[in-house]
Image (cartoon, rainbow, N blue to C red):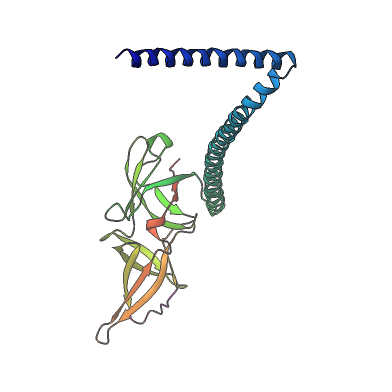
Amino acid sequence: MSYPLKNNYRSRGRNSRLKIIAIIIAIVILFFISQLGLLGEVIHRIASPLWKAENYTVDKFSGMFSVIRSKKSLISEGRALREELGKANANLLIQKVYQKENEDLKVLLGRNNGRKNVILSAVLVRPSISPFDIIVIDIGKGSGVEVGNKVVYEGALIIGEVSEVDAKSSKVKLYSSPGEKHIALIGPRSVQAEVEGFGAGSFMAKLPRDMEINDGDEVVMPNISMSILGFVQKIETEVADSFQKVIFKIPINLSELKWVEVELNK
């Protein structure tokens, strides 16, 4: 039993001596390397791959972040350009609207046919929305508008009269309202007749059959200034009837009416 213990002690002692010798040899080698100036080179060779890997990783991530920043910058610039383009397109459309409106106003103001005390008004509500051929305009008592004022279009086409007046708006009842009756002159011979409104800008008149009326003849209101009520579109006759029906219409689309002129009393 005593022999194995002695062998263990001997083995442990031998291992300790070998470790001490290895440490001494390593110290001696490092000493000579340092004396010869080779320590820095050895460390450099050992660390160089690590440094290169670190630099490569840093460069890659820096490049990646640079690409991400560039994409974000491009997206922001694209969004800003789209916004500017949208604003430019909107301004162009608005400019076209203003140009068209300016042209329309010049035409209207240049066609009053010598009418005096005429004020231009915008149409707020058209017959396409309002019933019974009634329109609403944007001027009222504050502009001198009164009930009974004549309302014309393009200076020559008379379309109705003011029926109600508020402070800043007025209602205009069109002559073509159903059941409305007025005296008018038809054709080049100015044949006088009673005309009745049928709605939507249409009228009907009954004349003796022997009266010569043709398609396209004008129908005017008896007035010193030019007051066109419409133009003949259709003539209906019956064999056994001694009268003929003359159908005529206002030559404008009332649902697209934008501007009218009101003849003031003062």
79 up-or-down from 6: above or below = below
Q: Nearer the viewer, residue 216 or 222?
A: 216
In the picture, the quarter occupied by the N terminus is top left
Residue located at (42% from left, 60% from top): 222
Give the percent coordinates (x, y) of residue 145.
Answer: 39, 40
Q: Is residue 231 left or right of residue 208?
A: right
Residue located at (66% from left, 27% from top): 45
Secondary structure mostly seen in magenta is loop
Magenta range is 209-216
Residue located at (65% from left, 21% from top): 43
Residue at the far bottom: name it: 239
Residue at the far right: name it: 36
Q: Is residue 28 magenta?
A: no
179 up-or-down from 242: above or below = above
Q: Is residue 140 left or right of residue 59?
A: left
261 up-or-down from 198: above or below = above
Q: Nearer the viewer, residue 116 or 173?
A: 173
Give the percent coordinates (x, y) of residue 65.
Answer: 55, 33
Q: Is residue 180 left or right of residue 61?
A: left
Give the percent coordinates (x, y) of residue 223.
Answer: 44, 57
Asked where in the image residue 132 lies, by quadrant, the reply is: bottom left
Count of marks placed on residues:
0
Q: Nearer the viewer, residue 125 or 143?
A: 125
Q: Nearer the viewer, residue 257 or 231?
A: 257
In the picture, the quarter occupied by the C terminus is top left
Asked where in the image residue 207 lies, by quadrant, the reply is: bottom left
22 up-or-down from 51: above or below = above
Give the percent coordinates (x, y) of residue 212.
Answer: 41, 80
Q: Is residue 212 magenta?
A: yes
